Each structure stands twice: as C-alpha cells, then as structure tokens.
Amino acid sequence: TTMIRKIVLNKIHHIKSQRHLHVEAKISALGLSLPSPAIPKGNFSNFVRIGNMVYLSGHLPQPAEGSLIVGKIGKDMTVEDGYEAAKYVGLNLCATLKNNIGDLDRVKRVVKLLGFVNCIDGFSQQPAVVNGCSDLMVKVFGDKGVHARSAVGTNSLPLGVPVEVEAIFELETEA
C-alpha cells in the first residue's frame, strides 16, 4: 500500500505540475507574456480575497516589455489601438492574480470585468475597446473566461492611459 500511495502521489504531482502550465501555456501560445505585477500607487490593495472570490483593482495597460500605453481613443488612438491596450490590461490582471494565488489554473470563473475607456466626447464604441480584455480572458481561460461586463467612457484616466479594467474572479475551492 505504501508503494501504491507513492505512485498515486507522484501521478497527482505530475498532473498538478502539468495543470500549472495550462493557462500560462495558452498565454505563451498567443505570443504573449505576463508582465511584473503592478504595485499599487496609493493607499489601497490591488488584490482582495474574500473566501473564493477575488477582487482586483483597476489595472493599466503596461506591456511586459515597453512603456505604459497612453492616449485618448478617438483623438490619438483608434479603437484597434484601444483593443490592444485592453489586452495588455488583461495580462496585467492575470499577473496580479498569479502573484497572489500562485496558479492561474485555480480560476474557476472570470465573474465580471468593469472597463473604463478614456475617449473623446461622442465616442460610443467603448465595448469594442474593452473587448481586448474580454477576448483575452476567453482565449486564456476558455469557457471559464466568459463573464459579465460593463464598459464605460470617461474624459480622463490615471496617467493618461486609454483603458483601465477591474475584475472579479472566483477561485476553485482548495482541497
């Protein structure tokens, strides 16, 4: 029985180690990488966990390599530029999540995204911009990435970024 237990534990460890790479492997397969997790620049936490629910503060479009993306949609950025920026926000959300929970495969569900779009007056394609983050969540988490969402236009965002997104995730129950 000791030998059987060792075999089972080795298989479980092997499965967990493969599982650990699953979501991150999808990110790599998309030709993307996680940036360093953001450090809050104020008196707040960018990650709060209550039970199996995780609440992430608004994140900005900071690529793993390169400078913070800045601009206003409809003025000096297109909807497509905003979509790409929102994708980088999604990667930043994943980086914060991984930094705090260790394994992105522990995500049971992306529950909700709230996206803010820095845009000119009269701009009405905020959902098309925030789709950059939403599409990334679905590509990375599969069916678990389908979520509720709001996309709101605003005249300004911190540091002049074109998009900011906050998120709510549900985690698998720990065994």
Image (cartoon, rainbow, N blue to C red):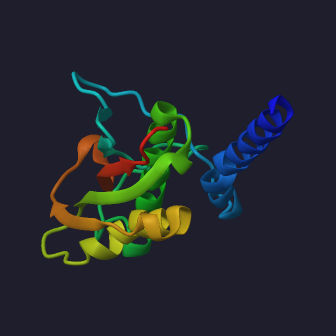
> Which residue is situated farthest in the top direction here?
43
19 is higher (above) or lower (below) than 85 = above
Q: Quadrant of residue 27?
A: bottom right
- Is residue 83 something that shows in the picture? no
Residue 148 falls left or right of residue 69: left
> Total marks drawn?
0
Q: Residue at x 43, y 55 (%)?
A: 108
Q: Position of residue 79 (x, y in %)?
A: 37, 74
Is residue 60 visible in the rendered structure shown here?
Answer: yes
Side of 73 relative to 8 (left or right): left
Q: Residue 56 is drawn in which quadrant?
A: top left
Image quadrant where residue 50 sits:
top left
Residue at point 43%, 33% (across, down): 38
Q: Nearer the viewer, residue 161 or 172?
A: 172
79 or 7: nearer the viewer: 7
> In the image, residue 61 lies at what x, y percent?
42, 49
Quadrant into which the N terminus falls: top right
Q: Where is residue 123 drawn, in percent x and y?
A: 19, 75
Compared with residue 160, is residue 148 higher up or lower down, i.e. above or below?
below
Residue sitting farthest toward the front: 1
Residue drawn at 25 percent across, 66 percent down: 149
Q: Residue furthest right?
A: 3
